[in-house]
Image: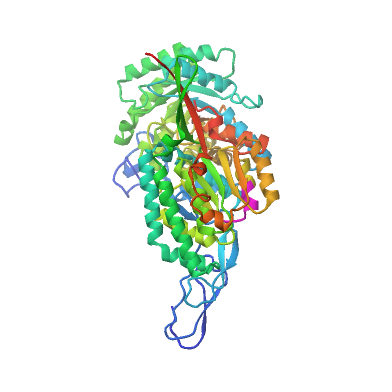
Amino acid sequence: MTTRKETVEVANGSAHGAGVIAKATTDEARLRVSKTYKMYVGGAFIRSESGRSFQVKGSSLESSADPATVNIPLGSRKDVRDAVIVAKAAQEKWAARTAYNRGQIVYRLAEVLDARRGELEASLVRAGATATGAAREVDCAVDRIVFYAGFCDKIASLAASSNPVSGPHFAFSVPEPMGVIGVLAPPRPALLGLVSAVLPVITGGNSAIVVASADDPRTAIVFCECLATSDVPGGVVNVLTGLASDLAPQLAKHREVAGLDAYLDDAALRASIERDASESVKRVKTQAPFTDDRIFDERGGQGLTFIERFLETKSIWHPVGL
Amino acid sequence: MSTHATNGNGPAGTAAPYSVGPSLGGGGRPALFPLFTSPPVDQVAVEERAASLAKRSLKKASKVWGLKLAISMMDLTTLEGKDTPGKVRGLCQKARAPSDSDPSIGPCAAVCVYPNLVPTARLALAGSPVKIASVATAFPSGLSPLTVKLDDVRRAVEFGADEIDMVIDRGAMLAGDYAKVFDEIAATKEASGAAHLKVILETGELQTYDIVRKASELAIAAGADFIKTSTGKVQPAATPAVTLVMLEVIRDHYYATGRKIGMKPAGGVRTAKQALHYLVIVKETLGDAWLTPDLFRFGASALLTDVLMQLEKERTGLYQAADDFSKD
């Protein structure tokens, strides 16, 4: 730490520092404590196993925690595979919890998000949002999590049916989670898009491997810090940063991944994901990112149908008249 | 595990650590068994060495070769109170033909079961090269009278076991009653007759590498054909470091006598990557001569699934789902 009056250049101490220089110019100036942005897998914040990173624009403000450019881990194909193993183990335990307990946990996530709204809004502003736009997005994200929290223990009733059949049997159909679901989050809005894609997946009892928006990965990482301090068990939501074009094919080809939800601008990539995923007969939902109007909308951006997209239906036949 | 320069043979600190001569063992007292005054093991160095051998990256053709070799070295094991003839038959089928998609994979070296299930395995494996190993000697604790333990062994051999996996009396080993441990192994060897004898040290209960080394030397001197780390009932089971310690005993014994002893890590080897790590340790410690099912085995149940998943990935280029492979 330095408080000398003249301009001094201090090598940045962050682990990703790589020669970034911070300038201290006044009596009050102190050495910036730069934040190391990491991916979130299995409840832990990790760097890419490849050691690679990519850069996003940081802040020119002296008061910011970020220097002018920020290094973000560039997730590798092996990071995807490692996450699959973690997500598979976590999913079985997540699905085994009572639906009521999952609802409590998801609601707790909304509480944590609300408590950290300042940080989330600042992160969105840093990536280009207006202050009012950021506040609106955080509001909507928190509300959306509450919305899905309520559905955790209702989805079984809403999506199930009892089916009268022709014969001395009764058939019940009950929804069950599919397993590990890959999510390619929309590039924008970075927070609400992520929340809107991930929450329905875990509400149904699946676990998720998410590739965060490459435009604003830092907001996704702040969201991960909310996850880490909520009660959502490690491994239920895993967030990788990096390029969808690198990571999507690996998610699509991996047989352990049961489904894919992809919000991508790139139509060619969407098509290639569908092709790759056909090998293991995954359930694939690909779409262009929703417009702001739609994703902020209570009807267009959330709903039961989003949960049902990654549920399987189990039918049980039961003899009648015994 | 902690390591002491001396153990068992007298006051700590008075022994010459490398005295392997005929007269003075530890503590200045004439050694009862000069062979058993083993050199101390450097815990930090052995763990470092074992860990460093995991850093080698095996890919593509060499990986496939290593994994197929690992399958041919597997003792597919089921040692549960709930084992049924059906489960053992399933295991035997898996040992004969581990992979549906690739007939060039397998067979495994052996199946390892409790004595009562040996006849079932015998029938299921008729006409195949897969051996039948049976645990015996009051597995897993070994805390029964010797006559009972020997009877256990004889019955297992009568039932048709090709290999006997015995446990040593860890209590006696830790109490320093080496003569008892030695005599029991020698008696078991005699009772096994033509069957191969694997001696389970249960290294997870032996506390230090020094005792592991001593127990390994003792077992080999008493007639073991194989030394084996663990029953699989105690954690930690096989670790790379403890395996390295035991392999070094085998190496030293080979240099001293020219006799080749086999090694079997058991329990805790669950992934293909771990299996390759063990093969690297064997190759670096004992050379290619030991890279054969006659001299190296894996005691495992879950390992086969992961190895098959990796082989299928190499064959198809697609990473596999665990649910597509049978667990038992």
Q: Quadrant of residue B208?
A: top left
The rendered magenta stretch, by its main secondary structure, is classed as helix
Q: Which residues are magenta?
A: A241-248
Question: What quarter of the picture does the C terminus of chain A occupy?
Answer: top left
- Pick whichever, B45 or B88, lies toward us: B88
Residue B308: horizontal and vertical position, in percent?
59, 32
Residue at horizontal 56%, vertical 24%? Answer: B109
Residue A55, percent across and down? 60, 65
Image position of A229 (left or right of A190):
left
Q: Nearer the viewer, residue B73 or A53?
A: A53
Q: Is residue B214 visible?
A: no
Quadrant in the picture for residue A295: bottom right
Colour pattern: rainbow
Q: Is residue A109 above or below residue B294?
A: below
Please check the rendered image and state whether residue A242 is part of the magenta-colored stretch, yes or no: yes
Question: Could one spot residue A10 in this view of the protein?
Answer: yes
Q: Residue at x 37, y 51 (%)?
A: A108
Quarter-wise, where is residue B7 in the image?
top left
Q: Is residue A66 magenta?
A: no
